[in-house]
C-alpha cells in the first residue's frame, strides 16, 4: 500500500513536469544570484509542488497509507 502511495506521488510529479520546472527555476536562481527573491520563489514552487503531489496521491490511494509512507 505504501509503495502504491509513493508511486502515485511520483506519478503526479511526472504528470506536472515538476523535475523540469525545478531544474529551470533552480538554474535561473543560481544564474541570477544577485536576486535573492528568485531563490525564495524556487523554494515556494517546490513546496507547492510537493503539496499538490501529496494531494493527488491521497486522492488515488488511502490518505492514511500515504501519511505512513511519508513518515517512513
Image: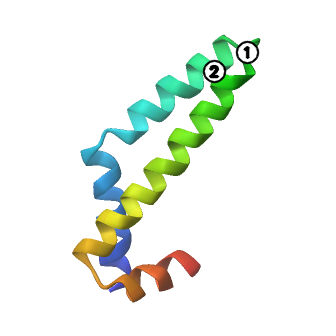
Query: What percent of the width, then of the height, locates residue 60?
Result: 23, 73
At label 2, counting other C-alpha atoms closer than 10 Å, the crowd grade (few under 14, some 14-19, many 20 or more) is some
- How far is mark 2 from mark 1, CA to CA? 6 Å
Please state the horizontal and vertical placement of residue 57, each as a whole percent of the image. 32, 69
Relative height, residue 47 to residue 30 (above, below):
below
Up-down relation of residue 29 to residue 1 (above or below)? above
Give yes or no for contact between labels 2 and 1 (Cβ–Cβ under 8 Å).
Answer: yes
Viewer-proximal residue among 58 and 23: 58
In the image, which disc is placed on residue 29?
2
How far across and down, in percent of the image, does residue 20 sit?
39, 31
Q: Is residue 21 left or right of residue 47?
A: left
Residue in the picture at 41% in, 79% down: 66
Q: On screen, 72 above or below 22?
A: below
Colour pattern of the rendering? rainbow
Locate the C terminus and report the quarter of the image it occupies: bottom right
According to the picture, the residue beneath numbered tag 1 turns out to be 33
Tell me what residue is drawn at x 35 percent, y 50 percent.
13
Q: Quadrant of the N terminus?
A: bottom left
At label 1, counting other C-alpha atoms closer than 10 Å, the crowd grade (few under 14, some 14-19, many 20 or more) is: few
State the image coordinates of residue 41 (x, y, percent, origin top left).
Answer: 59, 32
SS at mark 2 in the image: helix
For residue 2, which quarter of the picture? bottom left
Identify the element where label 1 is drawn.
Answer: loop
Amino acid at each position: 500500500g505504501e509503495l502504491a502511495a509513493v508511486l502515485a506521488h511520483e506519478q503526479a510529479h511526472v504528470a506536472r513536469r515538476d523535475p523540469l520546472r525545478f531544474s529551470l527555476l533552480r538554474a535561473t536562481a543560481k544564474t541570477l544570484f544577485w536576486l535573492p527573491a528568485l531563490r525564495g520563489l524556487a523554494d515556494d514552487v517546490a513546496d507547492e509542488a510537493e503539496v499538490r503531489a501529496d494531494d493527488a496521491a491521497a486522492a488515488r490511494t488511502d490518505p492514511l497509507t500515504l501519511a505512513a509512507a511519508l513518515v517512513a
